[in-house]
Image (cartoon, coloured by chain):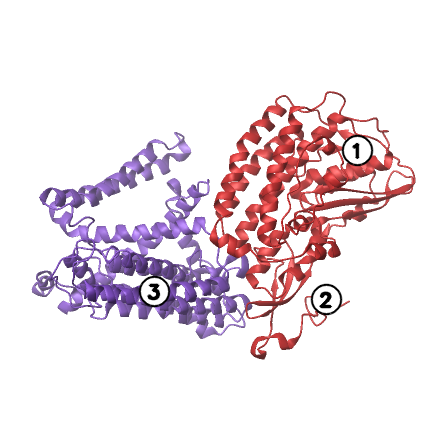
Chain colours: A purple, B red
Amino acid sequence: MLDYVTSYLRSNTTPGQAGNLLWAFIYIILIFLGLSVAVIAMNWLERKILAHMQVRLGPMRVGPHGLLQPIADAIKLLIKEDIMPAEADKSVFWIAPVLIVITAFTTFIVVPFGPTHAVTDMNIGVLFMLGVSSLSVLGVVMAGWASNSHYPLIGALRSSAQMVSYEIAMGLAVVAAVLMTSLHGNGLYGVAHGAVGDGTLSMIDIVKAQQDQHAWFIFKFFPLGLIAFFIFAVAMIAETNRAPFDLPEAESELTAGFHTEYSGFRWSLFFLAEYSAMIAVSSIAVTLWLGGWLRPFPTWLTGETWDLVFSLFPAATFLLLALIALVGTLRMPKHPYFRVQTLGLAGFAAVLALIGILLLLPPVRDRIQDIYWFSLKVAGFMYLYIWYRGTFPRYRFDQLMRVGWKVLLPVGLGVLILTAIVGVLL
Amino acid sequence: MSDPSTNISHLELGDRNETFLDSNELVINMGPQHPATHGVLRVILKLDGEKVLGTECVIGYLHRGVEKIAENRTYAMFNPYVDRMDYVAAVSNGLGYCEAVEKLLNVQAPPRANYIRVILTELNRLASHMLWLGTHALDIGAITPLFYTFRDREEILKIFEKYCGARLTTHAFRIGGCLYETYDGFEKDVTNFLDFVTPKIDEYEELLTTNRIWVERTKNVGKISGKECIALGVTGPVLRASGVRWDVRKAQPYAAYSDFDFEIPIGQNGDTYDRYLVRMAEMRQSLHIIRQAVGKIPEGPIMAKVPKVIKPPVGEIYHSIEAPKGELGYFIVSDGSTQPYRLRVRPPSFVNLQALDMMVRGQLVADVVAVIGTLDIVLGEVDR
């Protein structure tokens, strides 16, 4: 038994490939928990960041600086009455949110948080991710149809049209990146000669290709990689129905779009799925263009010292967060009413500091690095999502379609062809 | 008459053949509880997919019978009621009513009162336009300007509160002048506000004016020509954005407006973008007017000689002012008693709302929201 547990650790590969069910299960649980925590954190961060962009404070009452607000919201949603419209198609209405959540979580099977930190590695990883995430359209259409109401129906129709159109541009950008994995050559940004790379769709191998070629694909064949990345970055916002492409749930037009009729726990599933999908597509973007788990400047800043400096980043981040929480604690109003909150925030600071100190230990430090850099890059995308929401007005439906079909699609095709040509020439 | 909520057959919403592939039209209710209808407006939309084939506005959800109340109140007692019509521009409503009754009584408000009236009314115009900008941007999906404009509108409300004790329904003016003298530091407060808000208006413009999405969402949306505006009686920024230079402040100067130098911003295309630009320019013009007025408030009384019991002579009067939303007119018929025999309000929102159908026909659902926002209606004034 012990041998079974430790056999995976020696295999130096993902549990899926090692065929170790126990570890695969552990990874699934970890990803599930991590994702739930990420969605909760994202909920709080979005409200806070958006609030500060809009000269207000955001949640402040539930817990210190509203830290417990997402939990309070979750409890509220769970104990809410479950309303099902009388005229709804019961079974479809029931299946839709479940389907959306399942697709959103399934994509994470192949997300590589590190060279071995993934549930499994498929040789069609990217394809699997795009395929599964596009299934969520089905859930949206089902939700809109089953509600048997006008606003959700229009929202669902908009949504399906939008997601399907943008998937094409997205796919072209992905193909450009996949093409880059197979290209040798000596192009801009120091792409090395004779690098290993036979073209791959596996998420892990794509990152490894970037490692071997000493170039994140965003910088490869400058500016081709950058343009492909840009196309993907735009398409993924449309794909996840976020501002400025949030037409399916355009509040001012369709009240809440396809999930207007949903409430309570069912609604929270849509919420969970939306944020998981955001993290999922961001993970694809990070893997394909931003070097996945690779740390920044792997070729410029090399050597023992730099390795050490970069390996201290995770600990430094948590210690910085702890410091911020500590400053927050000291700045809490000195009033008996705030005593519990102040203590809570101090405890939170202590927990963060403890994690930071834990991360300083060499064995932990070395293992956590991959996950840290990956999460940091994804977090950067999450911030962008919030930033867009605070800045942009919403596109109109025809304009959205025009952007997708008349701008992103031709540019994506052009980038694809140019990538192929440049790859052959260099 | 049939109830519009159950019977929509009386709608003449275009030819059935207009629909794409002869699919079924979709009739949906937008409102009265809907985030984008600015209160309790209900629009029945007839759609072909996303395309609007026709609209019908159902109003009256906020009807309080203001005009009928006027017939049972004395002239002075009715004054606070007018604040409740366009509650985001209460000062303008009060000004219009007071001036109409003054005209009926043949009384002139003293110059000092007129200057105070101009300052407060223009401040109110700014507040109203700020609220419009925030909600209009919110309708189009930009959530941030709302908070910026509300932050700055707050400063105006603070000045109102200091002046007359109320923030929204101010009841700032009385028949014959103003009740309250300006408080100590009033001029300083107003000047400080002007210095504070000038860069803020640039800030709003930075977020929106050249924003690609904003321009795409507003250009050529809800177009209406000057001729159509005049035919429908549409006034205010909507009319001016269509290229008609008509502003009651210039055309028939009232209060102290003839003393000030200001421009009437006009647009050319009559689309939503032009209306946005016109209102932004109007905000700057308002600042310009206040800056001129606050420097030279004349000394003197703030109240004209008005009899304790207001009993206008038999007759009728129509007086209109340029409210933030358009021409606000009061038609008062007096039978010589202490109460009006009939009082009729010409509310700009109500008249402008008529143009909605013409502006959105053939456009998309999202444009309906944009056009409702750009018409800048307040349901309290539409329904009265």
* Residue depth check, mark 1 versus mark 2: number of the one nearer the observer: 1
Q: In this view, does B19 lie above or below B311?
A: below
Q: Do the residues labelled 3 and 2 touch (CB within 8 Å)?
A: no
For badge 2, the amino acid type reads: Asp
Q: In which quarter of the image is the N terminus of chain A?
A: bottom left
Q: Residue furthest bottom?
A: B22
Residue A24 horizontal/vertical position (percent): 19, 65
| Pointer 2 local density, CA inside 10 Å: few below 14, some 14–19, many at least 20 | few
- Residue A303's spot in the image, x, y percent? 10, 45
| Residue projecting furthest to the front | A425
Mark 1 belongs to chain:
B
Which is more foreground, mark 3 or mark 2? 3
Residue picked out by circle 1: B175
Do pointers 1 and 2 mark residues of a single chain?
yes
Secondary structure state at the residue bearing disc 3:
helix
Name which residue type carries label 1: Ile
Gap in angstroms between the C-alphas marked 3 and 1: 69 Å
Q: Do labels 3 and 2 share a chain?
A: no
Residue identified by numbered label 2: B3
Q: Which amino acid does label 3 sit on?
A: Gly
Residue A417 drawn at (x, y percent): 29, 67
Q: Which residue is drawn at 42% across and 67% down?
A: A405
Front residue (pair B321, B25): B321
Label drawn at residue A412: 3
Image quadrant occupied by the C terminus of chain A: bottom left
